[in-house]
Image (tube, rainbow, N blue to C red):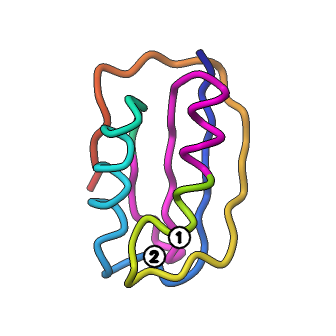
Amino acid sequence: MQTRRYLISGRVQGVGFRWATTQLARELHVTGTVQNLASGQVAVVASATATVLERFQHRLQHVNPWAHVERIDVDDLLTHHFADFRIIN
């Protein structure tokens, strides 16, 4: 189990990106959080196996047809066990 933080830049707010990310996370059995940041970016903290997190990151690029992901910055975090995946307001 690993935990990573994804900082997603581009047109990712106001287009249903958080909802689509939540659906993807639940499909892949990823736990964690997703939230809009004041900077216009979206932050995702996700926990799963390394293989699942790689798949999750790849699919974040095209998780929503109305979004346009320009960049995803990734940081490894200390492993955290979340109960589920949820949107933080």
Callout 2: SS:
loop
In the rendered image, residue 67, in percent from the top left (x then y), is placed at: 44, 80
The disc placed on residue 41 is 1
Q: Which image quarter holds the N terminus?
A: top right
Residue drawn at the location 71% of the way across and 48% of the way down: 74
Question: Is residue 13 covered in magenta?
Answer: no
In the rendered image, residue 19, in percent from the top left (x then y), is placed at: 27, 60
Left or right of 45, for residue 79: right
Residue drawn at the location 52% of the way across and 59% of the way down: 60
Question: Is residue 55 covered in magenta?
Answer: yes
Would you name the residue on which mark 2 appears?
Answer: 12
**Disc 2 or 1, which lies upstream in sequence?**
2
Bounds of the magenta span?
34-57
Against 40, is 60 above or below? Answer: above
Against 22, is 85 above or below? Answer: above
The disc placed on residue 65 is none
Say if mark 2 contacts mark 1, CB within 8 Å: yes
Q: Nearer the viewer, mark 2 or mark 1?
A: 2
Residue drawn at the location 53% of the way across and 70% of the way down: 41
Against 88, is 67 above or below? Answer: below
Q: Quadrant of residue 29?
A: top left
Left or right of 62, for residue 2: right
Q: Quadrant of residue 4?
A: top right
Give the residue type at disc 1: Gln
Cα–Cα gap, marks 2 and 1: 7 Å
